[in-house]
Amino acid sequence: MSQQPEQPSVRRIVLPSGRSIEVVRWGEQSHTHRGLHMCPDCGSGLVQPIDWSEAPEDCWNLLLNCPNCDWYTEGLYNADQVRELEDRLDEGLADMLRDLQRLTQANMADQIDRFVNALYADQILPEDF
Ligand SMILES: [Zn+2]
């Protein structure tokens, strides 16, 4: 098996919209291994699609951005790659919702503590309601 670094192939494709894009293809292994959510510049796993459109042959044209280092790329990706990116985005959303729930609970616990302390200190009066 060859250990030489893979060279990307670059070709230009004209989309049905008339827009022309440059497609950079790396070997299947490095593509699959890295995943579209990983930034090749800074290594962040937060790369996300900014814009997308359907392309021929069950592919999608994606404009990807890394919010960590502001890296951008545009390319044509197959359905499996896009599905994997969607799974990663779903996981990221689930993580954010869990964090939001924890934060909301922490804030509510803090408010309840303050309310109880104010009650004991006679700082809450009937006219407050
Ligand atoms: Zn980055």
Image (cartoon, rainbow, N blue to C red):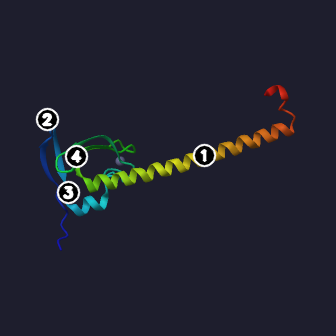
| Residue 123 seen in the current view | yes
> Looking at the picture, how far across and down is residue 66, in whole percent?
35, 45
- Crowding at mark 2 (Cα within 10 Å: few <14, some 14-19, many 20+): few
Q: CA distance from mark 4 to mark 2?
A: 15 Å
Q: Quadrant of residue 122?
A: top right
Mark closest to the chain's N terminus, 3 or 1: 3
Where does the image place residue 56, in percent across and percent down from the top left?
17, 46
| Amino acid beneath label 1 | Leu
**Which numbered mark, 3 or 1, is in the foreground of this view?**
1
Quarter placement of the C terminus: top right
Mark 3 near ligand 1 (CB under 8 Å)? no
* Amino acid residing under circle 3: Trp
- The disc labelled 4 sits on which kind of residue? Gly
Q: What label sits on residue 18 in the rendered view?
A: 2
Residue behind mark 1: 103
Q: Nearer the viewer, residue 80 or 74?
A: 80
Q: Residue at x 52, y 47 (%)?
A: 97
Count the marks: 4
Q: Position of residue 93 (x, y in %)?
A: 46, 48
> Which residue is labeled 3 in the image?
26
Left or right: where 87 falls relative to 123? left
In the image, is 111 to the left or to the right of 34?
right
Q: Residue at x 31, y 56 (%)?
A: 35
